[in-house]
Image (cartoon, grey):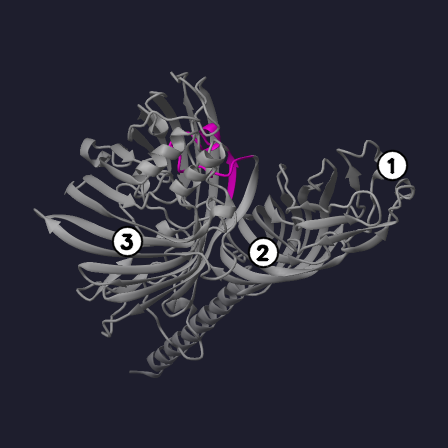
Amino acid sequence: MDRSEKASTAATALLQQCSGQRLFLVLSASAALSVQAVAAEPPPAFSWAGAYIGGNSGASIPLNTQERLQAGSGFGSTAFDLYPPSGERTGVTFGAQAGYNWQLGPWVYGVEMDFNFLDGRGGQSGTFPAPPAYWPPGVLSYSVDYEQSANYFASFRGRLGYAFDRSLVYITGGVAAGGARGPAILALSGRGIDAPFTVGPSQSSRMKYAVGAGYEYAFADGWSVRFEYLFLNLSLNTQLFDNGADFQYASRTRNENHVFRVGLNSLLGTDNNVADHADAQSGKQTDGDSELYSVHGQTTGVLQGYPKFPAHYTGPNSFTPFGQARFGSTTNLFAGLRVWEGGAIYVNPEISEGFGLSNSVGAASYVNGAVAKVGSSAPYLRYHRYFLRQIIGLDGIEQEPGDTGSHSELLEATQNQLQGTVDKNRLIFTIGKFSVGDVFDDNVYAHDPTTGFLNFAFNTMGAFDYAADAWGYTYGAAIEWKQDWWSARAGVFQLSDVPNSEKIEPILLRQYMGVGEFEVRYDLFGQPGNVKFLLFADNGYLNKVDEVVDIALATGNLPPDITNNDLRKRRVKFGGGVNIQQQLTPGLGVFLRASMADGRYETVDYTDIDKSLSGGFVASGLLWERPKDEIGVAGVVSGLSPARVRYFALGGTSVYIGDGALSYDGEKAMEAYYKWGVVDGLDITFDYQFLPNPAHNLDRGPVSVFGLRLHAEF
């Protein structure tokens, strides 16, 4: 190679080296620009979706601080009105809230529930000077003594907001509860009216509500702070003071408040997995199928009516024979949070509105279990369930995440149940406020009136006189031991303070029900089924029916009155029954319940049945290629004890029935429904019930009850 060729080769090599360096520089610059471009792009917007839980504190300012006791019957002049000092004042408020958000672009919407202490509410007790009108009779002063008022408020609200990344502005509104005045005693001193005036807790027929707005800022990925204003209207609280001597005072207090508060929330987000929320320091990993929290909801509206029907007479607890139509609805939120391994707390606020037919009386097998027995023309809020449930596995075998083999099963995500793998051999403890039917007497084909049969007699044993307030809930504790093919359950629950009361017995175990159930699961011709045996005992102050009747006949004080508290003594009412469910083919199953109770005693908290036999079938739309549809048909025959027949024949009334007389025959009822599944989570049910002799009475009926139910859930 000559000198010129060497020079050419060296130049080429130099050019290639320079080109390589240039390419490297170009690639490096491009990479740097790309990194800068990525860095320059705005980070993803903050997500407000998911569950949250937190606390709040602030102040409440009452709008109305004037008190007035309006002189009514017996006084004849407003000059005798009393103006005691007001107990309403600015006070502190604090509490807790929990909710769930959905997000669509910048729009955030969701639901929230809260419970808060509210200071500075209620009447003021003391002795005060009387107005001049009282001086001539010699009454110079009067005294008012209030018991504890409901110094709290709770709400169940919707929220709608607009997010600016980590900032959220929102409006909110919904139904509230609380703020009722407590019972009170009013006494006038000196000469004149000597008998004191007494009154129970305040009543209100108007809706209580909370509306407002707020600003929330997420200062960290899992935490936010909020500033909120609420206009809290706890309605017009009315109390009628009566001294039993034709003199009355009326108190009407408008309970309205401005609430200003600051809150702190823990944002749980939408990644609802226990393992993802495990302690970062311990690094503990939990079954990947286990939910951290659970949020479900439902709303059910029922329109029922019946045409005019034959009736020889009508009593205070009868269906009106002239025909009637009524609408009622319930809306629930089912919220649950896992608090430790195997343990979870659940809270269920409920908004109720409307009435059952004839104000929920007229038939022992009452026709509507989906609407609250305590009717109201205005929506009202109650927290019917709040309880702790603890699951303890007994197999002692390490399970791999998602393992649902012979020693375990996977619980589904549903109302008041967190998804997760549990031992088949396990103990379940439940304590708090809930319904006896949440644990006992379950049946997959007939148990939930919001989705299946509406009639009481098909959703539980007809003679199962279980502990409950007027809404069907009470305080109690239950334990379940579940094995592969059998389960055993036992529980103790507070009775109402007096039978069929809105109040639960306040003293623990003074009046209570004990209940036990044993369940056997099996396969019959390859189809699953089970049978449950249940026993219960109501231990409380009850009337013996024959004693009430005998005293009424001896004194000539008819009709007999089962609500006479002077005759109630400590007694134990026993009962029990059998509950069977059997699948015939996939999509078709039958149920059968038989029950009896000691009819010597009055109805405690459920319905006016002493013996009952019910059964029916439910067919899924899978059988006719409509998988969301369902058909149900059922019938029941129930009866009364001889003592109770005698009582009702003399015109007595009870919880659900009382026609003023009785031509007895065991009550019969039939129900058929078709449920049309419109889409997932939405269904419409067409329901028909036939009662040949409502309230066990051959002199009334037959009654045809037509119903339309709309149900939605998520």
The answer to whether residue 439 is visible is no
Q: Quadrant of the C terminus?
A: top left
Give the farthest residue toward the front. 554
Q: Of helix, strand and loop, which one carries label 3?
A: strand
The answer to whether residue 477 is visible is yes
Q: Position of residue 248 (x, y in %)?
A: 73, 38
Q: Of helix, strand and loop, which one carries label 2?
A: strand
Note whether 569 is above or below 663 in the view shown: below
Q: Which mark is residue 479?
A: none
- Which residue is at a point 48% across and 33% down the rendered structure image? 328
Q: Position of residue 685 (x, y in %)?
A: 35, 30
Q: Position of residue 238 (x, y in %)?
A: 69, 40
The quadrant where residue 461 appears: top left
Q: Nearer the viewer, residue 266 or 246?
A: 246
Left or right relative to 627: residue 153: right
Measure how far apart labels 1 and 3 are at the Cα level.
Answer: 61 Å
Q: Of helix, strand and loop, which one carries label 1?
A: helix
Measure how far apart labels 1 and 2 are at the Cα level.
Answer: 41 Å
Q: Nearer the viewer, residue 105 or 447?
A: 447
Left or right relative to 205: residue 637: left
Q: Amino acid at mark 1?
A: Ala
Q: Which mark is residue 79?
A: 1
**Front label number (3 vs 2):** 3
Magenta span: 351-376
